[in-house]
């Protein structure tokens, strides 16, 4: 295996040239996936771009691709492995690229919460566990085993509707903000929702409060999207009359309610691209995506909603050095940083993912 360290001595031009050469050598045997939040020096080499689930589904259809190099974070690579064909191998250029929100709902804590809820109600018949796709494979597997389902930022409302048609309550994790705005959109009142703190007994509630609640939201959040505040929306509207605000539903409830539009990374891009020339937009999502849209559409005023820099630091770990190292090792027959979900876990997670695909 080629060591990584020498790659940090290469210039940007050398990295570009060598990544391109390795891609050419591998040809259709390798497909590079680039998430929308990825840094530009890596994103430009992606064969497929999009959000995490879209990329995994597109890659699985590339049956000629023996290797899937996912420039994203660990849970995304896991989904790609779960949905890919048996002959395909998924690689994550830097294994340290994780997701702090996904880590907020680990399997041990979720199981503890499920047992605790089982002490105050019949969870198997009254509660549907729903996990955001931004979670680890074992969490998705837990949902698959307990009649639950996965959701994305674009289909969370549909998935919640499906869940309420089956059982009266929902345990939603790991992102409380997506769960809250999605349930509210369906007409669930804020007084019918509680936040479960996994560090406290019964999540910090008494049994009767939990029995009354329709939605139990996990105390998790995205470190990037929580940075956007109502004051930022007010600031842009005061400075630029007529500006439109569009945010990701991982933003806080108040920010989502104040925005003109909200949606997934795909929806954000589609909405801004469809807007007329000269229109002004303040966008509340990760900085790399906003900058990419700004460079793509100089005829529109595109602004980053937060006055401070909000980048996904773990996504940022995938750099050109790691991508070049991964690709050149592959070109020489060395497979590095493989992401492989154990089959029992993958089978359960696949159940929850397929439920979502059937719903949405």
Image (spheres, rainbow, N blue to C red):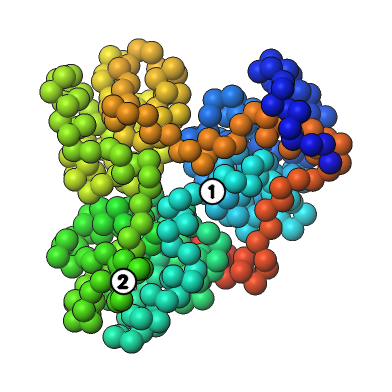
- Asked if 19 appears above or below 106 in the picture, the reply is above
Q: Nearer the viewer, residue 216 or 106?
A: 106
Q: Nearer the viewer, residue 326 or 274?
A: 326
Q: Nearer the viewer, residue 33 or 59?
A: 33
- Asked if 131 appears above or below 7 in the picture, the reply is below
Instruction: Tally the marks.
Output: 2
- The residue positioned 17% from the left and 27% from the top of the image is 235
230 left or right, relative to 32: left
Q: Position of residue 216 (x, y in %)?
A: 29, 68
Q: Position of residue 190 (x, y in %)?
A: 17, 61
At mark 1, the secondary structure is: loop
Which is in the foreground here, disc 2 or disc 1? 2
C-alpha distance separating marks 2 and 1: 25 Å
Based on the displayed image, in which of its 4 quarters is residue 165 positioned?
bottom left
- Asked if 227 appears above or below 195 in the picture, the reply is above
- The residue positioned 26% from the left and 47% from the top of the image is 252
Say whether disc 2 or disc 1 marks the residue closer to the N-terminus.
Answer: 1
> Residue 98: which disc?
1
Q: Which residue is mark 2?
A: 200
**Which quarter shows the C terminus?**
bottom left
- The residue positioned 32% from the left and 60% from the top of the image is 219
- The residue positioned 21% from the left and 31% from the top of the image is 232
Q: Position of residue 149 (x, y in %)?
A: 45, 66
Q: Nearer the viewer, residue 162 or 142?
A: 142
């Amino acid at each position: 295996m080629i060591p990584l360290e020498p790659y940090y001595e290469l210039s940007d031009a050398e990295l570009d040239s060598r990544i391109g050469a390795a891609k050419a050598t591998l040809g259709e045997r390798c497909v590079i996936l680039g998430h929308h939040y990825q840094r530009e020096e890596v994103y430009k080499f992606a064969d497929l771009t999009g959000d995490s689930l879209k990329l995994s589904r597109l890659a699985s259809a590339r049956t000629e691709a023996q290797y899937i190099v996912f420039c994203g974070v660990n849970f995304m690579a896991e989904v790609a492995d779960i949905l890919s064909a048996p002959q395909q191998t998924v690689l994550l250029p830097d294994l340290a690229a994780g997701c702090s929100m996904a880590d907020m709902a680990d399997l041990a804590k979720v199981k503890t919460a499920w047992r605790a809820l089982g002490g105050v109600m019949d969870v198997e018949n009254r509660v549907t566990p729903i996990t955001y796709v931004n979670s680890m494979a074992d969490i998705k597997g837990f949902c698959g085993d307990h009649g639950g389902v996965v959701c994305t930022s674009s289909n969370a409302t549909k998935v919640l509707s499906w869940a309420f048609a089956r059982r009266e309550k929902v345990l939603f994790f790991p992102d409380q903000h997506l769960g809250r705005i999605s349930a509210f959109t369906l007409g669930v009142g804020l007084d019918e929702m509680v936040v479960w703190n996994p560090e406290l007994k019964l999540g910090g509630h008494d049994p009767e409060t939990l029995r009354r609640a329709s939605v139990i939201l996990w105390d998790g959040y995205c470190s990037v999207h929580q940075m956007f505040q109502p004051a930022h929306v007010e600031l842009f509207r005061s400075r630029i009359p007529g500006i439109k605000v569009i945010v990701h539903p991982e933003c806080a409830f108040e920010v989502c309610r104040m925005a003109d539009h909200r949606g997934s990374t795909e929806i954000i891009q589609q909405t801004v691209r469809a807007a007329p020339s000269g229109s002004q937009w303040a966008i509340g999502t990760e900085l790399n995506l906003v900058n990419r849209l700004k460079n793509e559409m100089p005829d529109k005023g595109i602004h980053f909603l937060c006055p401070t820099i909000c980048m996904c630091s773990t996504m940022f770990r995938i750099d050109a050095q790691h991508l070049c190292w991964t690709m050149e090792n592959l070109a020489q027959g060395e497979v590095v940083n493989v992401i492989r979900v154990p089959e029992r876990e993958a089978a359960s997670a696949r159940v929850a993912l397929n439920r979502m695909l059937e719903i949405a």
